[in-house]
Image (cartoon, grey):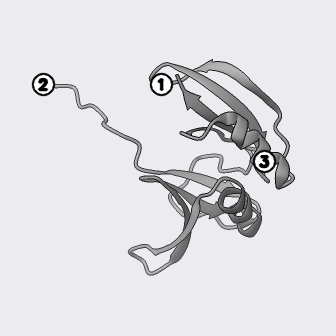
Amino acid sequence: MQTPTLSALDHLVLTVADIDRTLAFYCDGLGMEAERFTVTDGTERLALKYGSQKINLHPAESPFEPKALVALPGTADLCFLSDTSVDIWIAHLEAIGLSVLDGPVPRTGATGPLTSIYLRDPDGNLVEISNAG
């Protein structure tokens, strides 16, 4: 019997304390797009779209089922790849009042070396923005 394998990550979920603050950070700060979508039960939800990826947002006060066993704001550590130089990211983030915690620093990603910067989103999640190579 062949062992099944995975091919890609379709989406992930962030449990957030304040949807509006989260949207402002990721849309205004990181250039993602807000997307409303309707699930099979008719419930409307929000997601963040970037490239071919998606992050679904669950409100902490009423997360959707099924959910992580311990679904809490501020428990994620996310790494995003960008073709824009991290130096340009630093200038952009500082211009809009967001603080870079660390970087640029060398790191290792899924496919090799990265140059990364770090900041925190409104819930305290660690956000890494990286250039490959």
Which image quadrant is residue 75 in?
top right
Res. 110 mark = 1
x and y percent of residue 19 in the render?
A: 71, 66
Res. 93 mark = 3
Q: CA distance from mark 2 to mark 1?
A: 28 Å
Which image quadrant is residue 127 in?
top right
x and y percent of residue 1 in the render?
A: 12, 24
Q: Helix, strand, or loop for circle 1?
A: loop
Label 2 sits on what residue type?
A: Met
Task: Locate residue 10 relative to residue 76 in the image: left or right.
Answer: left
- Contact (Cβ within 8 Å) of mark 3 with mark 1: no
Label 3 sits on what residue type?
A: Leu
Q: Helix, strand, or loop for circle 3?
A: helix
x and y percent of residue 56 in the render?
A: 54, 59
- Contact (Cβ within 8 Å) of mark 2 with mark 1: no
Residue shown at the point (15%, 25%) measured from the top left: 2
The answer to whether one can see residue 38 in this image is yes
Which residue is denoted by mark 2 in the rendering? 1
